[in-house]
Amino acid sequence: MADVSLRKVIKRYDDVEAVRGIDLDIADHEFIVLVGPSGCGKSTTLRMIAGLEDISDGDIMIGGDVVNDVPPKDRDIAMVFQNYALYPHMTVAENMSFGLRLKHYPKAEIKARVTEAARLLDITDLIDRKPKQLSGGQRQRVAMGRAIVRNPKVFLFDEPLSNLDAKLRVQMRIEIKKVHQKVRTTTVYVTHDQVEAMTLADRVVVMNKGRIEQIGTPNELYHKPATRFVAGFIGSPAMNFIPCRLEDAGGTLQIRLTDRIAFALPPARAARYNVLPRTDKLLLGIRPEHLTEAHAHLEPGVETFDTVLDVTEPMGMETLVYFTLDGTPVCGRVNPNAGARDGAPMRLAMDLNNMHLLNEESGVVL
Amino acid sequence: MSTLTIDKAGPTRKVKYGSMSRDRAWALRWSYFFLVLFAIFFLTPPLYMLITSLKSSAEISAATNPWWVFHPTLSNYIELLSSNQFLRFFWNSAIVSTVVVIITMLISVPAAFALARMKFWGSATLATGVFLTYLVPDSLLFIPLFKMLALVQDYTGITLLNRWYVLLFVYPTLTVPFCTWIMIGYFASIPKELDEAAIIDGASWLQTLLRIFIPVALPGLIAATIFAFTVSWAQFLYPLVFTTSVDQLVLPVGITTTLIKGDVFNWGQIMTGALLGAAPPLIIYAFLMDYYIAGLTAGATKG
Amino acid sequence: MADVVVEQGRLGSSARPRKGAGLRNVLGRKSTVAFFLTLPLILLIALLVLYPALYSIHLATLNKSMQKFVGLGNFTFLFKRDTFWMVVKQSCIFALTAVFFKALIGFIVAHFVNNVPAKKQRKWRGMLLVPWVIPPAMSTLAWLWLFDPSYSAFNYTLSFFGIGPVNWLGDTFWARFSVILVNVWYGAPFFLIMYLAALKSVPDQLYEAASIDGANWWQKMWYVTLPMMRNIIAITTLFSLIVTFANFDIVRILTSGGPLDKTHLFATWAFKVGIEGSDIPLGASVSLFMVPILAIAAIFILRDVSKRGNEA
């Protein structure tokens, strides 16, 4: 058990910087998820922690010791790979014990650890099978078992669920969370799936183009994104970004979305945005769940407008509606009984209490 | 336009279906017919070996129907298998092929591992070089090799020419490049994560090779072994050039040079010897056909 | 090659004193290990392939007793001999004809095998590959016996049709025909196996799509099968061209080059003048004439193999 720290870690391939200076402190027992689109440097970061890639600059510390030059086997880490990387010629038990056997652990202890890990993962019956005879989910468990028996300081997961089908993925996600609650080993988990990141993590690290965009708990990222990238990446369907302007209208501050549509800001928001120059190019960020059908009684801060729907997608518990505002495509979420139909006019309500205002150029959330 | 073609296709479709399955049945019949013809073409020489080997000299010189054995006898087999000379050829072939297989594996497996997994200075060039070496035929090198071995003999006093063990030096030039090449292919097809998992598990390079790569690539290893053995067993030019004394000869050269005495061809014995000489590769092929074919196709298709 | 150079450059430039020094050692150790793992291979290629190849160029410039440098003397001598030009011609005829028929028969038979039900394919394939498995020196002896002038099984059979007797190995035309026939017999199964593997790698959906588009058998062959097999056909053909061009065993055992040197190939003639005739320099010169043709084929193979690698 240990904490992990990254200090200004850089990874260069020839003249390309894949990771451009990462600072990250991972506390003992913590479950950290690195998430981002492909090519954002999250896997490279994980592999640098593992020691599979050497770092070009900076320091990596595990349990307080700088491990830059320590080979992977001496870092006391365990890794679970995307394609499981089980040794095809070994049984489940042999797969799990390979590392311990290489280190010449006593036979009895190896057996005890394998049995315990198999029990924990509910694969006791499979212990003598070869990987080929296992299903995807079972292989995934074995790969985790191989990590657990080592009793390492840190678990590293490299997109471990992306080879599984959707249903199994949800199941294994819960499984991984349960295992972590039992063994409490510090965990770094890489995924491109924001749902996985949100559901598993104590803290999520959102990465983009080799840099960290934001670090925070799942709720922080969802409700207080720091940048346009994070705001757009977290949440599905994604947040809408609508070009807008700030205007003073008779003592109150309002945002104008189109020639026809302008909303007065709620007092708390108005106070916060009043300092902004009125000339800035801005984006209104609003999640689909804050764009709903208009009720007769409106909460304060909720404004209505009329639009014509392009397409509707009934999802059962809700209906997604798509329309455009001055050419910008917008998605909203309405009650399935609200009468939304393709091509029909509809009155929608926007909850400005949950709005975000972004600088269009810098992408910073204001 | 499109509606027009659909209209046209509509009525003819039904008829076409019936004729298609009939076509298929005919195609199958024709396929079998031609396969039988080609099988006769391909199998005539080995069958003729077998037929002749069961005939006595008297029957052969009587010029009766060559395709039939009227008085089958095993005398040719008994004679050859009790001849010290023939057994000597067989033994020489066996020891040369076995040792060459071992040498080949010891050289090509580690090299293939390094070339497939450890990018080092010049590794790409070396891999290409291995492939080019594989394309160099024996008939290009036998003259300079002959002269080189003669020179080595002159300088060091070690007798190499006309000794069966000289073949242990020259056969690997034919087997190692191909075996290295196909092992590179097999090793490269092992997912990178597998050695990374091994590294994290604490395995050294050598342990990764011995405990992960070799077991996982075992089919490739078997294919390479079969190749090395059959090439060594069948090689004809090098032993013809480098060995001359009767007790140093391997089977192919031994049979062609000693059983053919002047103009007297004892065909019964020659065919028996040829069949016995062909037996080891044929037996290996019969039992390990899939590996044999995998190795054959891997050589030209693994990039 | 390029990335390797860059890697080396990175190794050199990043000789920063403290940071990463240990890892460089590990890297250093890795390349040391790699060096030792490949060392036997490098030695083998250098000493027993590369050196003899260069040495044969040196040999080719010496006189018969190998004591005097004669420059291109051996080559000019060869150019003036009719036998040499005949060998050049015969080698080309032999290689091109044999490879053409091997490829053709292999292609046709591969289709027949592919036509029969999958369960029976294994058996047929196993049977048809037998010629490739038997050591050519052994099987050629069987052919020699089949062609035998006095007890020839072929002439015996042909006599029932009122043909012959054919002087298979004594007549120039029939001798050339015979060596090509035996080579085709030996090599066609290799093509068969390669083509069969290629045929199997064409996805069924492509044929189904072509059928729906209304393609007939010939169109499917021309627009689907052949383009998908193009690369394997090219590699196999070029590869076989090299092996056939450099063939020794079959001609040596069947005709020893006769009648009147009419069936000699480079390899057998080089053996005759170099080893049997003890004129090593001249033999080396003869075999060196194989190099240009082999090199051209090798370049094309290398191009196709790397192309294949890129596709995969």
Image (cartoon, rainbow, N blue to C red):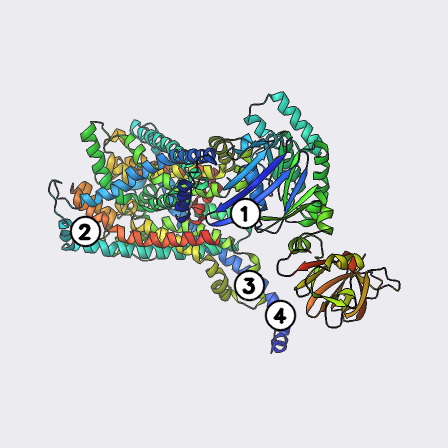
Disc 3: which chain?
B
- Neighbor class of circle 3 (other Cα within 10 Å; few <14, some 14-19, many 20+) is few
Among all residues in the image, which is located at the extreme right? A297
The amino acid beneath tag 3 is Asp
Q: Residues within 10 Å of mark 1 (few under 14, many from 20)?
A: some
> Helix, strand or loop at disc 3?
helix
Residue beneath label 3, please? B23
Quick one: B247 or B99, which is closer to the camera? B99
Residue, disc 4: B13
Nearest to viewer (mark 2 / mark 1): 1
Secondary structure of the residue carrying tag 4 is helix
- Disc 3 vs disc 4: which is toward the camera? 4
Badge 2 sits on which subunit?
C
- Specify the subunit that label 1 lies on: A
Can residue A53 be seen from the camera position used here?
Answer: no
> Disc 3 versus disc 2: distance between alpha carbons?
52 Å
The amino acid on which the numbered mark 2 sits, given as a three-letter code, is: Leu
- Numbered disc 2: secondary structure: loop
Which badge, 3 or 4, comes first in the chain's sequence? 4
Q: What percent of the width, then of the height, locates residue B155?
A: 19, 30
Give whichever of C298, B250 is nearer the camera: C298
Q: Quadrant of the C terminus of chain A?
A: bottom right
In which quarter of the view is residue B13 placed?
Answer: bottom right
Name the residue beneath numbered marker 1.
A20
Residue A315: x and y, percent?
77, 58
